[in-house]
């Protein structure tokens, strides 16, 4: 079986003033609350990949310093599991629901879900037996601290 990995990685290190804007909304019965949170730093890592159906631990190269992450946004069109550093003994494991953004930013009131530096790779599992998963990862980092 041939496994096809389509990945695009962009890293902009020490670029001044990169901002990620996160629009957070709540709505019910015609009532709505919306707020935009903007996080700014000087480094960014982006990763787009396609994980074939029924794939376990597809490796994708990415380096992240856990202490320097300012915001994290992950979106997949299928349920996936992301493990950092190893597919068998991961530093962190993130469960991403289909079409449900996984969002964290510094100051959101929750602990950073990446507690261990990502030394070279993540491993992505797509349990769907019929559909490939399109995964988008956006990370904003402070490269100077």
Image (spheres, helix red, strand yellow):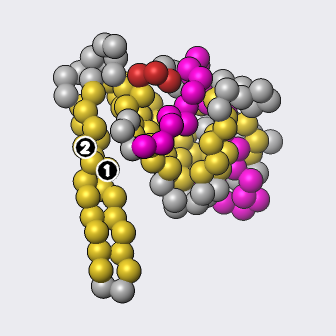
Badge 1 density bin: few <14, some 14–19, many ≥20, Cα 10 Å: some
Badge 2 density bin: few <14, some 14–19, many ≥20, Cα 10 Å: few
Quarter in which the C terminus is drawn: top left
| Nearer-the-camera pick, 13 or 59 | 13
Magenta segment, prevailing SS (helix, strand or loop): loop
For the magenta stretch, what is the residue range? 109-133
Dot 1 corresponds to which residue? 22
Dot 2 corresponds to which residue? 38
- Residue 98, given in percent of the width and then of the height, sits at 58, 60
Kindly identify which numbered label has been placed on residue 50.
none
The residue tagged with tag 1: helix, strand or loop? strand
- Residue 54, given in percent of the width and then of the height, sits at 76, 51
Q: Marks 2 and 1: CB-CB under 8 Å?
A: yes
CA separation in Å, label 2 and label 1? 6 Å
The residue tagged with tag 2: helix, strand or loop? strand
At 64% from the left edge and 48% from the top edge, which residue is drawn? 95
Quarter of image, res 82: top right
- Residue 1, given in percent of the width and then of the height, sits at 80, 42
At 60% from the left edge and 51% from the top edge, which residue is drawn? 96
Quarter of image, res 131: bottom right
At 25% from the left edge and 33% from the top edge, which residue is drawn? 40
Q: Is residue 60 placed above or below 72 in the rendered structure?
A: above
Q: Is residue 2 magenta?
A: no
At 67% from the left edge and 26% from the top edge, which residue is drawn? 91
In the current view of this chain or complex, which residue is farthest to the bottom? Answer: 29
């Amino acid at each position: 079986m041939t496994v096809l990995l389509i990945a695009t990685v962009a890293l902009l290190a020490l670029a001044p003033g990169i901002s990620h804007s996160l629009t957070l909304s709540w709505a019910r019965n015609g009532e709505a609350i919306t707020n935009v949170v903007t996080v700014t730093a000087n480094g960014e890592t982006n990763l787009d990949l396609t994980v074939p159906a029924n794939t376990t631990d597809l490796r994708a190269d990415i380096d992240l310093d856990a202490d320097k992450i300012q915001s994290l946004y992950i979106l997949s069109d299928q349920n996936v599991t992301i493990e950092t550093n190893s597919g068998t003994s991961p530093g962190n494991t993130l469960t991403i629901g289909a079409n449900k953004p996984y969002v964290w930013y510094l100051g959101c009131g929750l602990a950073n879900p990446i507690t261990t530096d990502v030394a070279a790779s993540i491993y992505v599992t797509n349990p769907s037996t019929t559909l490939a998963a399109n995964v988008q990862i956006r990370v904003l980092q402070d490269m100077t601290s």
